[in-house]
């Protein structure tokens, strides 16, 4: 990871695994804790980032993100941790808590629209991707304005939030968001300089394999 680039360096991560991630149940705003695998994943990422000099840590207010951020912070005890409402996961409305396989069977028309033009679709009683992107990018702008160039910020958020930020940074249409992936504890490295935001690393998860090879628990 290039640390000599002018601008603010952003380590954008997704939270660790929860039980609902494992069974493919939509979480949205449901406030679940990490399971044991998720805690191990967060510690693995924390270990991988232990030599980073973090200026500050920001997290979504949902507990799965906060727990992930706190486990990473154990390797950086003097780094402040803040909650940021703009990083909260997409509001899935009526679909929150539904299992993916049941959703597809019960809402075939919605699924078709979501597959063909996801940027134009709003979750019933919830948000759409454009709204999520607008608030997430605004949150990044607000956060980065607080710090000088060469700062490194760790930001812990969620699948849809991260994907919309990455679409913005890579100048990809939200309709193409599925071309990107965000596994649990995925690490993305972004840079912010002036009005420009760009990504250099996307969905890096090698820390998980290294952690397993070391037999750490």
Image: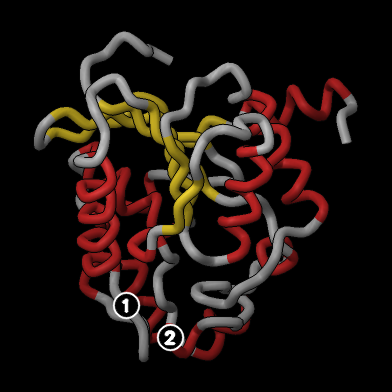
Q: Residue extending furthest front?
A: 78
Look at 87% across and 29% down and name the residue there: 216
Q: Is residue 165 left or right of residue 65?
A: left
Q: In x, y percent, where is residue 9? A: 33, 27
Look at 74% across and 65% down and name the residue there: 19
Q: In x, y percent, where is residue 186? A: 54, 40
SS for dot 1: loop
Q: Are marks 1 and 2 in contact (CB under 8 Å)?
A: yes
Q: How many marks?
A: 2
In the rendering, which numbered label is found on residue 213?
none
Q: Is residue 195 left or right of residue 86?
A: left
98 shown above or below 39: below
Look at 66% across and 62% down and name the residue there: 21
**Foreground pick, 202 / 192:** 192
178 shown above or below 191: below
State the quadrant of the N terminus.
Answer: top left
Q: Residue extending furthest left?
A: 195
Earlier in the chain: of badge 1 and badge 2, it is 2
Q: Dot 1 surroundings within 10 Å: few (below 14), some, or many (20 or more)?
A: some
Q: Provide the residue designation for mark 2.
A: 93
**Foreground pick, 84 / 106:** 84
Look at 36% across and 67% down and name the residue there: 115
Q: Provide the residue designation for mark 1.
A: 127
State the quadrant of the C terminus.
Answer: top right
Which of the 4 image quarters holds residue 196? top left
């Amino acid at each position: 990871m290039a640390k000599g680039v002018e601008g603010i360096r952003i380590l954008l991560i997704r939270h660790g695994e929860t039980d609902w991630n494992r069974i493919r149940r939509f979480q949205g705003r449901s406030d679940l804790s990490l399971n044991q695998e998720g805690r191990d994943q967060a510690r693995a990422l924390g270990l991988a980032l232990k030599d980073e000099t973090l200026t500050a840590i920001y997290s979504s207010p949902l507990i799965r993100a906060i727990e992930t951020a706190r486990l990473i912070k154990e390797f950086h005890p003097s780094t402040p941790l803040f909650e940021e409402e703009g990083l909260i996961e997409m509001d899935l409305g009526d679909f929150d808590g539904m299992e993916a396989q049941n959703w597809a069977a019960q809402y075939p028309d919605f699924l078709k629209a979501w597959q063909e033009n996801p940027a134009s679709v709003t979750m019933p009683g919830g948000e759409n991707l454009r709204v999520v992107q607008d608030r997430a990018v605004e949150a990044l702008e607000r956060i980065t304005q607080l710090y000088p160039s060469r700062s490194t910020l760790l930001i812990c958020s969620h699948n849809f939030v991260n994907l919309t930020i990455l679409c913005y940074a890579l100048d990809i249409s939200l309709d193409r968001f599925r071309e990107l992936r965000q596994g649990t504890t995925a690490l993305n490295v972004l840079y912010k300089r002036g009005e420009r935001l760009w990504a250099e690393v996307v969905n890096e998860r090698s820390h998980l394999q290294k952690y397993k090879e070391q037999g750490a628990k």
